[in-house]
Image (tube, rainbow, N blue to C red):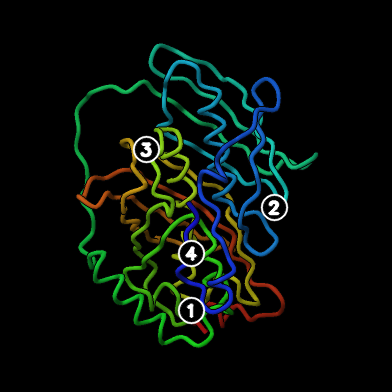
Amino acid sequence: MHSRPFFLRGTQLQETLVKTFADMLTLEAAGKDSWIGPPGPGVGKRLFGGHALAQALKAACEAETEGRMPHSLHAHFLQPGMADKPMRYDVTALGAGRSFSRCRVDAMQGDSHLLTMTVSLQVEEDGFAHADGPPDVPDLASARRALEEWREAQDNLDRMPIIGGLGLRPVEVVPVNVQSLFGGVAHPPRSAMWMRARDAGDADAAMARAQLAYASDMLFLRNALLPHGIRPGEEGIQIASLDHAMWFHTAPDFCQWHLYASESPWAGKARGLSRGHFFAEDGTLVASVVQENLMRVVGGRPAEMLRAGR
């Protein structure tokens, strides 16, 4: 079932339909160990990195024949792709034992090699266990009220870079601190948001992991920009994901709300580092994420403005 986008209003709200994960993550077989993934909402005309991550992970699951599920992925974004074109995912087995198997997934658009990902899959086992708890942040109901108040106060929401397009994605997002995440004033390099899949249908174990991989790239590199008062999409700054790693600690159920808490411990040399954790609403640590991104000053924007957060 399609849902209406929370962040869009007026005629856009009436006319726009959101693609669901079922639309975007159902792959078509294209020969031995190859699958085709349909296009979806991009960043302008460019492919959204989380879209490629999710489809590549889904392809790795399609190629697995012994019931193992991904516990980690490590991906490198090699060049930008087009949002309106399908992707081909070629899976190469790298070896398997009784418990683990590993493969490489290469994402292609025509002759362009856009992404390469290694995936490790494991048979579920018991073992020693410990886990950090979630940070102390406002609950979902409080965050939703704050978001609604902020939304109603905006007169240019649909024109804001990146933000207006959030309503087109198959993930509901409720920021814990909407002013810091969406504002243009410098803030400490950390954020948190409640997230879940828009389509409420049941997802199998492979689909749920792919959904979480998609969500893990949403607003993630924003952390490295926060101390500098820069919004993604602004003139004078070129941003892109460079690589992305993710570990699944337990099977997610992304039809339920998750807290995505993240921070940027470092930026420099035209790059920024972000790390984050997904927690289920009951506080269970579900997954961890690390990403490095490009954040390059361009177009004559003085570097001192970036450092000053102006």
Q: Which of pointers 1 and 3 lies earlier in the amino acid sequence?
A: 1
Q: Is residue 251 left or right of residue 3?
A: left
Q: Residue at x 55, y 54 (%)?
A: 19
Q: CA distance from mark 4 to mark 3?
A: 30 Å
* Residue tagged 4: 4
User: Relative to 26, does residue 127 appear above or below in the rendering?
Assistant: above
* Residue tagged 2: 80
Residue furthest out toward the right: 111
The front one of 140 and 47 is 140
Inspect the image, locate mark 3, and give the three-letter code of the amino acid beneath it. Phe
Inspect the image, locate mark 4, and give the three-letter code of the amino acid beneath it. Arg
Inspect the image, locate mark 2, and give the three-letter code of the amino acid beneath it. Pro
Q: Secondary structure at mark 2?
A: loop
Query: Which mark is in front, 2 or 1?
Result: 2
Q: Are marks 4 and 3 in contact (CB under 8 Å)?
A: no
Q: Which of pointers 4 and 2 lies earlier in the amino acid sequence?
A: 4
Q: On residue 248, which mark appears? A: 3
Q: CA distance from mark 1 to mark 4?
A: 30 Å
Q: Secondary structure at mark 3?
A: strand
Q: Which of pointers 2 and 3 lies earlier in the amino acid sequence?
A: 2
Q: Residue at x 22, y 65 (%)?
A: 139
* Residue tagged 1: 229
Residue 36 in percent (x, y) is at 67, 35
